Structures are given as structure tokens and as C-alpha cells.
Amino acid sequence: MTAPVPAGERTTPPGARAAGRWSALLRSRSGAAGLALSSLVVVATLVSFAWTPYDPSRVSPRESWAPMSWEHWFGADRLGRDLLSLVLAGARATLLVSAAATVVAAVTGTLLGAAAAITPRWVRAPAGHAVDALIAFPTLLLAMVLVAVYGAGTETAVLAIGLGEGFFVARVMRAEMARVLAADYVLAARAGGASTWRIFHEHVLPGVLPTLTVLLSLVMAVAVLAEAALSYLGYGVPSGTPTWGRMLHDLQAQITVRPLVLVWPGVAIVATVLGFNLLGDGLREAGDPRVRRS
Amino acid sequence: MALFLLRRLTLLAVALSGTSLLVFLLLRLLPGDVAAIIGGVEATPEQLATLRARLGTDRPLPAQYASWAGGVLAGDFGHSMLNGVSVTDELGRKLVVTLPLTLAASVLAVLLAVPLGCYAALRHRSRDGAAVSAVGQLGIAVPSFWLGIMLAALFAVELRLLPAQGFPVDGWAEPAAAARSLILPVATLALAQSAVLLRFVRSATLEVLHADYMRTARAKGRTLASALLRHGLRNAAPPVISVLGVQIASLVVGAVVIEQTFTLPGVGKMLLADVGNRDLVKVQGTVLLLSGFVLVLGAAVDVVHRLVDPRLRAAT
């Protein structure tokens, strides 16, 4: 702290800025709740790779429809499989597909958004119209078309959800990029002779990053819902892989005899979606002092 | 306004033809020969050739698209690749279930979300207002099919008040039974929709509540209720209406899933079966119909949005 800070350099070290952002996130009530809930789900998923109370595929006729107990917290299904273990194992496919779809959405959304915001007018105008039209195309219908062509599978689910949400990301990114491009420092960079690529890379991307982070948390939540719906309908990851949606589909066949077991996979979905939704809200509040105050 | 209508209609026409082209091309990406898939391995080359001629897949792509799109414009969506049934007739038979389901659900969703959203905004500092928005936040995270399953478990299995699933074989020839079997699906879809809508109604109302013109109206001696009706409604309505436009897409998707949950013989359930059977002509027709529905209603919402918001009219 003895050396004088050279003019034009930031006075706070980058670590402190990151720490400030974390504490802002934790100060927001939804941010703290969302971070807790989504970390819980992610940690439970990671643990399930190494350990579940029982082998989720272990069939035990003697324990068919075992009620909730210390041995089986969530009870057991018709085949006597432990439901808690199945719910934990079901988190893997759901979270992996949703996370992969979110990455696809981020990449397509950023690229399409950039095509509709930064490129010369003859590319920009049609790209913008395409984004506006594609956003109206429901994700699930896109998934149905892709399933009809390629058959159901993990890749189809990731691609369908990722592209469907990507169009939504693209529309927000286009507006955000237009906002950044209108800033004086971009004008200055342009006047200084910076190339389009350099402006995109050095000014636009960092400028839209906070919005993109918020958006991706919300997209993750929607992706979890979409994955659950797809596997519930029987067109998600291949059969044999436990997922929450497929569990609900299978257990629904016995709704008249065992309605209660249907609660658990649904609670898992709700907790995950709520977690990422709240995290997104918290990130937005942390990044926007205007919202934080009100 | 006339200029706006013309531009919006042109845009709608472009979007519709773009969508039809997209759906057509996506379904032509199918690896391999459709005729070979339908005909099976033991089909002779002559049989395959007749099959190709019947399906029209022996012609070049632009010709195929032109004849399909021309047929659609004349109300002919082609014929099923599996059993030759007219897709238009099939869609008509299924729409008598899907249309009442989606219409009733959207009306109910608005009736639920608008008063609740206003209430949550008016009482946003008190506990019950916060409780309403918390329920809304929770509702967004609930998958519609699980909500449907839970409602069926409660009202059909436990209380035995309503059928858990299915639709009368005779359809609307038994109006009471048909309506009864739609109660749970409509309630499910409406609740799922209203959770999203509630949030937007709440934030639109909150914004209006803190506006300067509301303070002026109150200062002139209007009660909060009359100020809201006179000034607030006009200002809060446009953003809510534009959200309704976006919601139509999720309504259509919701109907597809809910029809599966309650085994209703509607367009959505048919689409799912056709996807499983890879009946491409039917999938193509159904997807075009559903996405066309979304686009047309979206355009209608835009027009209404403009009618209720004079600021937009002045902008052109």
C-alpha cells in the first residue's frame, strides 16, 4: 500500500471485486436461498455418482411398495427399488442434459445475438427477423420434430432444448449488445481503428457477461423443466437411465394404488428449478444496485 | 394503423412460410429413405418405387414442398404415411378436445392471475401480499404434468370426485361426462399458466402504483381504487398483454403434455404417438398447425397491444 497507484489503473484488486460480488449475491434473499438450494442439488448429484443408500437398480420383491421408513426414507417402488436412491440417481441425467443444453443455448444465443447486432446491416436485418420468428417456435415442438427425425436420445434432447432456449438468449443478447455498442467507449474504440472482432471480443462480450450469467441461471431452470417433460413423455435420454420425468411416468401407472410415491420426483424437480430461478434473481439483484435498494 | 396492420400481416405471412419451410426441411433431414423404412426390409424394388411415388418422395424437394404447401393453403394437410387417413380430418377430430382445453385454461388463467397479481402488488409490503408472490414463484418451478398428477391423486384417487384420466368414447355426444373429464386438465393448465402471468401482473401493477400520475390522481382526491381503474389499468395492461402473446407458446406446449397426463385424445397426444411412429406427414401437419396457431395469435396480441397503448400508435 506504499507504492502510489498509477493513474488509469483500477485501485481495487480483482479478487476484492469478486468477493464484493459474492457478498452482494448473499445479501439478496433470493440469491442466498437460490445458491443454497442449487448447491444442495448439485452436491447431491455429485455424491450420487459415488454413493447412494442402495443400488438404484437393485430389485427386491420382498420390499415391494415398502412404506417410508428409516431403511427407505422415500419408500420403495413396485419392484422394491429404493426411491431415494432412484431420485438421487435421476438427478444425474437431468442435470447433465440441462447443463449441456444451457451451454448450447449460451453459444447459439451469443452467436445469433451477435449476428443480429454487430454485423453489417444486410446480415443484421434478416438475422434479427429470424430470431424474432424462431423465438415463437415452442421448444417442445422443436424437440418433437428432432425426435421424429433422429429418434429420441441424449443428443436430441440436448440439441432441442439448447436450440429452443438459444433463440430466447439470442433475443436478449441482441438488445444487450446493441446497448453496449451505443456506448461512448465503443465509439472511441471504433474511432481508434479497432476491428469489429476486437470490439466484440474486448468490449461487447465483457459488457454483456453479467446479463448472460443471470440469463443462463434462468435458462438452466427452464432446461430442467424441459428435460423432465421430455423424459416424462418418453422422448428423453434412453430408457434404463433413471430420470425424474421417467420415474413420474412409470409411477403414474399405479396412481390409483400408490399416489404418495409420486410426490418425491416432483419435489426434486421443483427444488432444482426453484434453486436456479432464485439464483438468477439473486444474481440480477446483486448486479443491479437499483433493484437492490428497492 | 392501416400501415401497421399491413406490415404486421406481411411479417406474419413471412413467418408462417418460413416456419412451414423449416418444418418441411427438418423432416427431410431423415437419414435414409422414408419408403424403405415404411416398406421394411422385405419390400421389393418395385414396391418401394410405388411407395415412393405414393409418398411423393421421388420428386425433387422444391416440387414436394410446393405441393405440400399448396395443399395446406387449400386446407389439405396430406395423408398419414401409415394408414392413409386424411391429416386434416384427424386434426379436426382432435381439435374438439384441444381447443376447449386451451381456451378454457387461458380464460381461467387470466381470471386467476389478474386479481391475485393486483392483490400481491397492492399489498406488497404486507405478509399476505408476499405470500401470494411466493406461491407464484413456487408455481413457476412446478412442472405442469406433476401438478396434474398431484391434482388427480387428490381429486380422483383420494376424494373420488372426478375421473383421473380419459375422455368419453362418444366425445361431446355425452356433454356432461366430457366436461367432467376436462375439469382437472383445464385446472392444471390454468394454474401452471397463471403462475407465470401473476408475476407480470404484479410487477406491472407495482410499476403503475409508484408512477407520478397516480400520485397526482390521489392528490386530486381520487381513491386508490378509482385512480387504479381510471389511470392504472390503461398503463398496466400493455405489458401484461404482450406477455400473453409469449404465453401462447407455453399454452400449446402445456396442452401437449397435459393431454398425455390425462390421456385426452387431443392434438398433443396424437402428435406424441405420430412422433413415436415416425409418421412424418402427420407430424409435419400437426407441428405446422400448432406453430401457426402460436404465430397467428402472437400477431393478434400485437395488434391488441397497439390498440390499447396509444404511445405505440404515435411511434410510427
Image: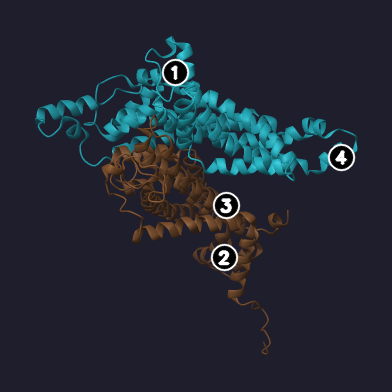
For residue B96, the mark is 1
Which chain letter matches label 1?
A: B
**In x, y percent, where is residue A283?**
59, 58
**Disc 2 target residue:** A203
Is residue A196 left or right of B89 when viewed as pictured? right
Can you tell which of label 2 and label 3 is closer to the viewer? 3
Q: Tell me what hue chain A is rendered in.
A: brown
- Secondary element type, mark 4: helix
- Secondary element type, mark 2: helix
The amino acid pointed to by label 2 is: His
Q: Which chain is cyan?
A: B
Marks 1, 2 in one chain? no
In which quadrant will I find the N terminus of chain A? bottom right
Q: Nearer the viewer, residue A272 or B4?
A: A272
Of callouts 2 and 3, the N-terminal one: 2
The amino acid pointed to by label 3 is: Leu
The amino acid pointed to by label 4 is: Thr
Which chain letter matches label 2?
A: A
In three-dimensional space, the C-alpha distance between marks 2 and 4, rounded to whole angstroms, equals 43 Å
Contact? badges 3 and 4 (CB < 8 Å): no
In three-dimensional space, the C-alpha distance between marks 1 and 2, rounded to whole angstroms, equals 54 Å
**Disc 4 target residue:** B216
Marks 2, 4 in one chain? no
Which chain letter matches label 4?
A: B
- Secondary element type, mark 1: helix
**In x, y percent, where is residue A267?**
48, 45
In three-dimensional space, the C-alpha distance between marks 2 and 3, rounded to whole angstroms, equals 29 Å
